[in-house]
Image (cartoon, coloured by chain):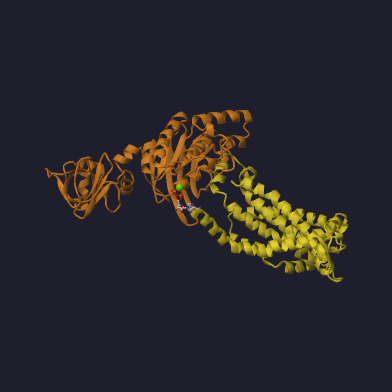
Amino acid sequence: MTHRKGKEGAFLFLAPALLILAGITLYPLLHVFRLSLHRRLLIFDISRFVGPENYLYLLGDTRFRNALGNTIYFTVLSVLLELLFGLAIALLLNRHFRGKGLMRTIILIPWAIPTVVSARMWEWLYNPDFGLLNHLLGFRINWLGSPFLALNAAVAMDVWKTTPFVALLLTAGLQTIPRDLYGAARIDGAGPWTLFRKITLPLLMPVILVVLLFRTLDAFRVFDAVYVLTGGGPANSTETLSIYAYKILFQTLQFGYGSAISVMVFLCVGLFTLLFIPLLRRRKV
Amino acid sequence: MTEIGFHSLCKKFKKTSVIDDLNLTIENREFFTFVGPSGCGKSTILNMVAGLESITSGMITFDGHSIDGLPPGERDIAMVFQSYALYPHMTVRENLAFPLSVRKVPSADRQREVEKIAALLALTPFLSRLPRELSGGQRQRVALGRALIRKPKVFLMDEPLSNLDAKLRIEMRTELKRLHREFPVTTIYVTHDQEEAMALSDRIALLHEGALRQCGPPQEVYAAPANLFSAGFIGSPPMNFIEGTLLLDLPFLASRLAEYRNQPFIAGIRPTDLRITGEKRENTLSGRVLFLETTGETTWIDLEWRGNRIRGKTGPVRRTARDETAYFTIPPEKLHLFDKSSGERLW
Ligand SMILES: Nc1ncnc2c1ncn2[C@@H]1O[C@H](COP(=O)(O)OP(=O)(O)O)[C@@H](O)[C@H]1O
Ligand SMILES: [Mg+2]
């Protein structure tokens, strides 16, 4: 009897949080899903149930496929580079040197700048006529004007901006590795490379996986960084799924089809998370 | 097969001196212990021998050759850490094999050595477990095994027993002695526990505030502490100290004490040497009982005597209560005398 009461009590305590979560995430999610099954065009005042029609249309939509490709390219390349640079910086910051505290602070600056501001900043850096980049290189390259360069330019900006965050998390991870382990391994005969491969990397893996999960989910939904920098152009070459969904939803007001694209983003991210969670569990040392 | 020499060894962290001019030779195959209170620089010495910590000045030699500049992996040493420093992501087998696999020992030999060392330390049933799935004592044995497996020239142990419970600690002492007999390798052991140091070592070195206070076989240090620090640190319960002025020549006092006549000094007497009785006899002194502590075999009694608090020993059956008067004798031949200002032993 008292046991039951305890359980009910627990539920009562959780209820407010659950209600809020349901209100701000579950309800909108279900609503978007419902919308995606409708053909709803605000300008023509059309709204009718069409079942899976929007999804069937998605399958043949080359612009959707282009956006999906761009998103995957952006995600894979930027997360990979951020992890590499972040790890390198974290390893450097984990050593003892003069001015280490100052260095840590300085390195965080790119991350502290609002995305929209840094996107504008990079837009100017990339400017073909007045940009610092061309000035330094002595070329006249239209960085944001060529389809191939533009997406990579967006990746570069994201790497610049987010590497500090990755480095910060990895530095925290490195600090949890006991110093004695390095002493023991050095006495056992391990050189720097063996230390890194046999001690640092495996013990940092749980943090690396968390970073990977965070960053992949973030990068997959990238919007403001790229949208402010290029607006999705030139010729949709930098259009990511979020930008495509935004344009369909709020520029052409096709709420049904836009919702279907959003649901696809959600499914991709959800699938990725589901694949990741067992890895995180297994890796707990 | 290594003799270790410390030559004018100094270590400073920034401006703070931790080790100041250490000169010492550790014999081949010796079990040598640095003992001293926490923070006196014991781990720092070991880390310098291991090459994990730099030397500020002076030199450490193995068989007369300086090891300065040799990386830890090339000194042919093995070390057991207080934290054990087992690799948490590797199984016991992988932990034991690590020093061999790093040195590219062929897999078959590695396998054989691991089996051998595991059998020696009763670790065979746990070979595929992770360190976190082991008890404290088992982890300790894995750490020992990882150090033993390479058959190093020098063995370093930094408080290896201090994370174990009292009973296990005594068991492991015996185990360590057995291992040292089986692998008679020059061993430097570090502990803050003087009893452990006495029980294990061929020789002990007392460290205090970065300086060597006394060095010698345990019995010698116990029987003739060279100074007040040594007298107070070695022996449990610790020695009683009584301040006074040397007034008359006792017949047993060596004539060299004559020059200390009328000078302040400190007399030391170990509680085990101070016999407490219930009745007044010839040559007994009397004091008020402050405190009693029974350990079963003996009863320790704290007495107040002329403003000093002194501890003495009595048999198990003695019945005394607080505030009663008790009588005690100080056997003169058990007395230690120290200079009050320098703390050095006089007699
Ligand atoms: N890396 C370091 N930087 C500054 N001071 C240190 C460092 N390592 C040890 N010390 C200081 O040196 C002294 C001796 O330390 P340690 O050798 O660890 O003592 P013990 O092992 O005898 O307890 C301590 O006062 C400690 O604070
Ligand atoms: Mg220590």
Q: Which chain is orange?
A: B
Across and down, in percent, residue B206 comes to 38, 44
Q: Left or right: where does residue A17 sit relative to residue B178?
A: right
The image quadrant that residue A36 belongs to is: bottom right
Across and down, in percent, residue A24 comes to 68, 65
Across and down, in percent, residue B84 comes to 50, 42
Q: Left or right: where does residue B222 sit relative to residue B88?
A: left
Across and down, in percent, residue B182 comes to 46, 29
Q: Residue at x 66, y 59 (%)?
A: A165
Q: Which chain is yellow?
A: A
Q: Residue at x 47, y 44 (%)?
A: B82
Q: Is residue A138 above or below residue B218?
A: below
Q: Residue at x 22, y 53 (%)?
A: B308
Q: Left or right: where does residue A119 sit relative to residue B277?
A: right
**Residue A132 visible somewhere in the drawing:** no
Q: Nearer the viewer, residue B171 or A46?
A: A46
